[in-house]
Amino acid sequence: MAVDTVEAPVDPRVELEKHYREFCEQLPDHRVEIINGRIVVNPVPTYDHACIVFQLLLQLVGLAKERGWEILTEMSVFLGPQQDRYRPDLIVVRPKPRMWGAGHIYGDQTLLVAEVVSPSSVVDDHEVKPRHYAAAGVSLCLVIDTLTGKVRLLSDPGQAGYRHETDIVLGGLLDLPEPWKLTLDTAAFTD
């Protein structure tokens, strides 16, 4: 007697996660993310982009060192199972944060996540990522946008998004709230 075999339907999120891991392995020198259910592969950031991250790093490093915090540039944020995978430009955490695997820090373990907007990432950096960062408990999301000349600080995360937003013109001073109590000079992000 012949036995019929029936294949179980494949969960699209499982397939997406499988392809994401394959791309990460095949393209270690690229920024691989899952954003809004799609795999996004970007080359290493431009010189200008890297300089902005460096200028931010210079302003954060003193306080981070004093408090024993870690500033990371090559890690992803874990937003939850079957969720997107974001690799921000900079993440600040306390030592030994809770991890999901070797390369993903749980969102609620972060003290700050920073995104530097590029022409190809405007919608993702301003809308998509902040909404998911907030739902994952990322306490502060800093969005530096030299294209519009603005800096946004999003705080007080919740399931529906951030409840507080501070927008300033690039070049002004921006106060980071507790636990930071630090003022950023955003003029450093211009040239």
Image (spheres, rainbow, N blue to C red):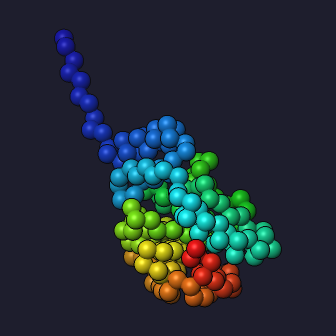
* 40 relative position to 52: left or right: left
* Quadrant location, the N terminus: top left
Q: Is residue 165 above or below residue 87?
A: below
Q: Nearer the viewer, residue 45 or 65?
A: 45
Q: Residue at x 64, y 72 (%)?
A: 56
Q: Is residue 148 above or below residue 78?
A: below
Q: What is the x, y in percent for residue 2?
A: 19, 13
- Does residue 75 appear anywhere in the picture? yes
Q: What is the x, y in percent for residue 100?
A: 57, 52
Residue found farthest to the front: 191
Res 70 → quadrant: bottom right
Q: What is the x, y in percent for residue 98?
A: 64, 58
Q: Residue at x 67, y 69 (%)?
A: 57
Q: What is the x, y in percent for residue 165?
A: 47, 85
Q: Residue at x 58, y 74 (%)?
A: 191
Q: Nearer the viewer, residue 19 or 147?
A: 147
Q: Nearer the viewer, residue 29 or 191?
A: 191
Q: Residue at x 53, y 58 (%)?
A: 46
Residue found farthest to the top: 1
* 100 relative position to 35: left or right: right
